[in-house]
């Protein structure tokens, strides 16, 4: 009958068939052998399994009719005892090729015969210790044990000492006893140290494979980082010159704060990167922040000349008060210009724009004061690089807020925030919910996009570590502190009005101090230690 491989013969014998049993198609289809496999022809004239062991008799009979099998005895192993090597060789020689049927070769077999007989595979031994070889490793035929021993010896620069005379004959026993002679034998048979991959590269590859396996195990998430910038975030295109600058900054601002090494760590940890829209938003905010952070040289020169002309006529307390208020006017004007350039600001109504600017100006001003804080002198550096200490604020009648303000500055200094943090946080403060808004949902949606960008930036900055939530929470806690400082600033302005320290009309208008009556301000006057 059919001549199959030795593995198939063994499986047939395991089913309990007698050695000389002849199997006919009728006998195969009988219920007695209904659990046997039925063999059929495939397109390549080779036998394949046509039915599993659980197939029923009816299916087997139908297949038998469609693919008739010749009645031939199954090949059985020889009964004459032979040595192990002779048995293996004999079994291979007696079996006919898998593609032959009754000794007749197919066209494919004829083509293979023209190329000559395939070399007989023989078991090869390790050239170092004589164990079973697994292949060529580091330029020599060795076993897995000698391969690992050679790799560890090279990567660790190991130095071994022989205890048996430095001439041990290496075999499977001595390889564990003498490492020096084993390493010498490795080098003698041709193993090359330069073929060993350094351990650091192996560690990187293992880490990448582990990360890939963990990624494959993760379920496919239905929530992904939205790269779509809402239509409300679209803003008027900047002038051509500014557009070219922004195009360059988009590829420079983020790498300035996120190093290549950090981005590579994020890639290995599968931290979602900043989207192109988020990178453009960050670039635009940082650019506007740099442009509207310091007053112009003309403005500084103008107010400096004014101070010099009026210093001789003013009282001691009026000079610091006037200097602080005039610098505050310049700062608030810069804040207004910065807010006008924010994406999303032009999409809200004009009354809401005015409401946001009036409410946020004092809070953003406190945030900018923190950026100008000098920890060495515990003072605030004005735009003209003049340091204002708590004594200067007391002389100006502003002792009501200076202690809390300096404490806030010290806390901000300890957080080591960068320009991106400040720019995004400023935008979040500007688009905060305020009383009297006509479209609070629209303002909240804009703020949510800035918050998400801030969170993604921190996530990339910390490589997704637990520090992400800590830093993000600390930055959000700044919002409540700014609300407190803003309220204190309003109370201070009311107190100054009662002390006949008239604020400039611009500050009275934007901070709604002009309409405050004396009766409303009286309780604040008692609380303010001026």
Image: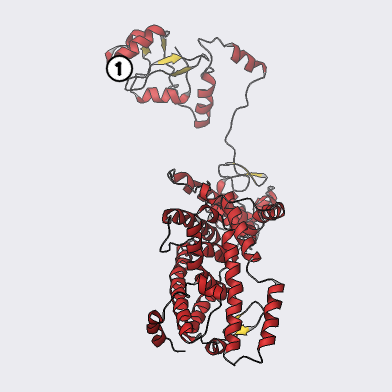
Residue at point 50% right, 83% down? 402
Q: x%, y% of residue 477?
A: 44, 69
Residue matched to label 1? 56
Q: x%, y% of residue 200?
A: 61, 57
Residue at point 38% right, 81% down? 519
Residue at point 63% right, 21% down? 117
81 and 350: which is toward the camera = 350
Seen in the picture, residue 313 relative to 513 is either above or below; the reply is: below
| Quadrant including the N terminus | top left
Question: Of helix, strand and loop, which one carries label 1?
Answer: loop
Residue 295 found in image quarter: bottom right
Q: x%, y% of residue 103?
A: 53, 10
Answer whether residue 260 is visible to the viewer in this image: no
Q: In this view, does 134 lie to the left or right of 239?
A: left
Residue 529 found in image quarter: bottom left
73 and 273: which is toward the camera = 273
Say few, some or many: other residues with alpha carbon within 10 Å of mark 1 (under 14 / 14 to 19 / 20 or more).
some
């Amino acid at each position: 009958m059919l001549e199959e491989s030795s593995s198939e013969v063994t499986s047939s014998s395991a089913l309990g068939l007698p050695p000389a049993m002849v199997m006919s198609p009728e006998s195969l289809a009988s219920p007695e052998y209904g659990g046997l496999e039925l063999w059929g022809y495939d397109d390549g004239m080779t036998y394949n399994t046509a039915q599993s062991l659980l197939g029923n008799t009816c299916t087997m009979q139908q297949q038998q009719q469609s693919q008739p099998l010749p009645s031939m005895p199954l090949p059985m192993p020889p009964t004459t005892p032979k040595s192990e090597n002779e048995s293996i060789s004999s079994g291979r020689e007696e079996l006919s090729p898998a593609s032959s049927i009754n000794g007749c070769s197919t066209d494919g077999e004829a083509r293979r015969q023209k190329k000559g007989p395939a070399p007989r595979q023989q078991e090869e031994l390790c050239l170092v210790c004589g164990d079973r070889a697994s292949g060529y490793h580091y330029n020599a035929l060795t076993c897995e044990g000698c391969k690992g021993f050679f790799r560890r010896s090279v990567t660790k620069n190991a130095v071994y000492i022989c205890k048996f005379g430095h001439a041990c004959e290496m075999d499977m026993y001595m390889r564990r006893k003498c490492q020096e002679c084993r390493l010498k034998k490795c080098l003698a048979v041709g193993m090359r140290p330069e073929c060993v991959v350094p351990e650091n590269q192996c560690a990187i590859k293992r880490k990448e494979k582990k990360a890939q396996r963990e990624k494959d195990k993760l379920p496919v998430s239905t929530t992904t980082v939205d790269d779509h910038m809402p239509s409300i975030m679209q803003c008027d295109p900047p002038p051509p010159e500014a557009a070219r600058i922004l195009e360059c900054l988009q590829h420079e601002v983020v790498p300035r704060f996120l190093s290549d090494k950090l981005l590579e760590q994020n890639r290995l940890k599968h931290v979602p990167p900043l989207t192109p829209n988020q990178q453009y938003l960050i670039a635009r905010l940082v650019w506007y922040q740099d442009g509207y952070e310091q007053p112009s040289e003309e403005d500084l020169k103008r107010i400096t000349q004014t101070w010099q002309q009026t210093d001789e006529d003013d009282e001691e307390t009026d000079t610091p008060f006037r200097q602080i208020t005039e610098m505050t006017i310049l700062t608030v004007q810069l804040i207004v210009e910065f807010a006008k350039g924010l994406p999303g600001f032009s999409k809200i109504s004009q009354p809401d724009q005015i409401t946001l600017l009036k409410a946020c100006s004092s809070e953003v001003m406190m945030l900018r004061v923190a950026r100008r804080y000098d920890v060495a002198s515990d003072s605030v550096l004005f735009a003209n690089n003049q340091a204002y200490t708590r004594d200067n604020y007391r002389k100006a009648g502003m002792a009501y807020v200076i202690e809390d303000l300096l404490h806030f500055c010290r806390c901000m200094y300890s957080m080591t925030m960068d320009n991106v943090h400040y720019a995004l946080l400023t935008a979040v403060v500007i688009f905060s919910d305020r009383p009297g808004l006509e479209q609070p949902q629209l303002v909240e949606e804009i703020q949510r996009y800035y918050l998400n960008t801030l969170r993604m930036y921190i996530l990339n900055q910390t490589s997704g570590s637990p520090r992400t939530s800590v830093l993000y929470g600390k930055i959000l806690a700044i919002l409540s502190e700014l609300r407190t400082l803003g309220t204190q600033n309003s109370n201070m302005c009311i107190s100054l009005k009662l002390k006949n320290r008239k604020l400039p009309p611009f500050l009275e208008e934007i901070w709604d101090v002009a309409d405050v009556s004396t009766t409303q301000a009286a309780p604040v006057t008692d609380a303010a230690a001026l």
